[in-house]
Amino acid sequence: MHHRLLVTGGLGFIGSAFVRLSLADRPDLAITVLDAMTYAGNPANLAAVAGDSRYRFVKGDICDRQAVDEAIGDGVDAIVNFAAETHVDRSILEPEAFLRTDILGTHVLLEAVRRHQIARYLQVSTDEVYGHVAKGSSVEGDTLAPRSPYAASKAGGDLQVLAYYTTYGTPVLVTRGSNTYGPYQYPEKLIPLFVTNLLDDQTVPVYGDGLQIRDWLHVDDHARGIRHVLERGELGEVYNIGGGNGRTNKAITTELLTQTGRKWETHVKHVEDRAGHDRRYSLDCTKAAALGWTPQVDFAAGLAATVSWYRENTSWWRPLKSGEFKAYYERQYANR
């Protein structure tokens, strides 16, 4: 059982959920968060634990060895690496940032694990490293076939992690999660973007025919899955963490239109499809289930609760959709 964790990228969407749930469930746990506070790292995501004596924050980049050492301090039992550039569209516009954080940053952390003799390191990854899955579901031993700069950078990080296990015996684990949704998600991803646009009576951009299929996983289930693997997983292994909720983007859009009282004819704008857009993802989660983890949040209920959260927390997301986000949004969609 681990008592002192370093959580990198802990101000982000999934990382902050992991921190909130872990501190709530484990009174004996202390967590240090290391976060570079990029556009997606929001201190408001951890406002609920900011006054907790078991929580410590260090501002810093995982590519910076000195910042990593400062965050480790007198020692930690395990590192959970959520820190990453994560948005596919941004990776197409600016791929170099993804290589730096997702590959070089992972290397810096792995070296810190060796230097400080940390007991466990868990790399949080994505189902996108498997690439398009025409039928069936990806298992952990499948060949990686990333098709975007983002997916390639995450695959590169995974391969480093597993190579360190083979070469140095570094105590590592990898989780690969499916598309995640829930509260506190930066509004560039499909569900929070569409919900917030629709709540503001704006159109939403549907890529191509909208029939791309994604497997949706609630953020709390994802966080619980990561914690489960950290505590019970076998070192050197990869574990898929999926929701089992395959839906087309069109179906998700239709449901969000219904929940916000908008109509397809007036609030949907079809745009040119993303370059190299994978058609389908699907995960086989047998290995994680064997550890005792299964998702708990019903998708329909989870999606409705997510819409309600954004409706009730406009003060969280409206400030985010100005400035940097507005410039990105115009750059991304103006000519599509």
Image (cartoon, helix red, strand yellow):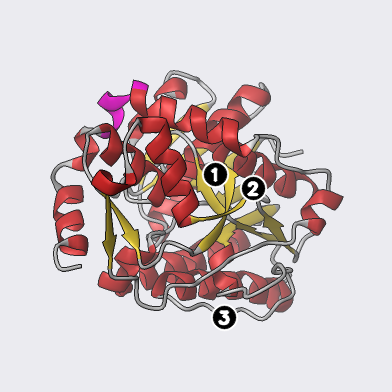
Q: Earlier in the sequence, mark 1 or mark 3?
A: 1
Q: Are marks 2 and 1 in contact (CB under 8 Å)?
A: yes
Name the residue located 36 percent from the left edge and 68 percent from the top edge. Answer: 208
Q: Is residue 120 left or right of residue 42?
A: right
| Quarter location, residue 43 | top left
As drawn, the label of residue 78 is 2
| Quarter location, residue 88 | bottom left
**Quadrant holding the C terminus:** bottom left
* Magenta segment boundaries in residue numbering: 312-317
Nearest the viewer among 275 and 91 is 275
The kind of residue on which mark 1 rests is: Leu
Q: Which residue is mark 3?
A: 145
Mark 1 vs mark 3: in front? 3
Q: Earlier in the sequence, mark 2 or mark 3?
A: 2
Residue 274 % position (x, y): 34, 71
The kind of residue on which mark 3 rests is: Ala
Nearest the viewer among 243 and 159 is 243
Instruction: Reply above or below: 19 against 154.
Output: above
Query: Quick one: label 3, few (<14), some, or many (20+) residues within 10 Å?
Result: some
Mark 2 vs mark 3: in front? 3
Name the residue located 68 percent from the left edge and 51 percent from the top edge. Answer: 244
**Quadrant holding the N terminus:** top right
Q: Is residue 167 left or right of residue 32?
A: right
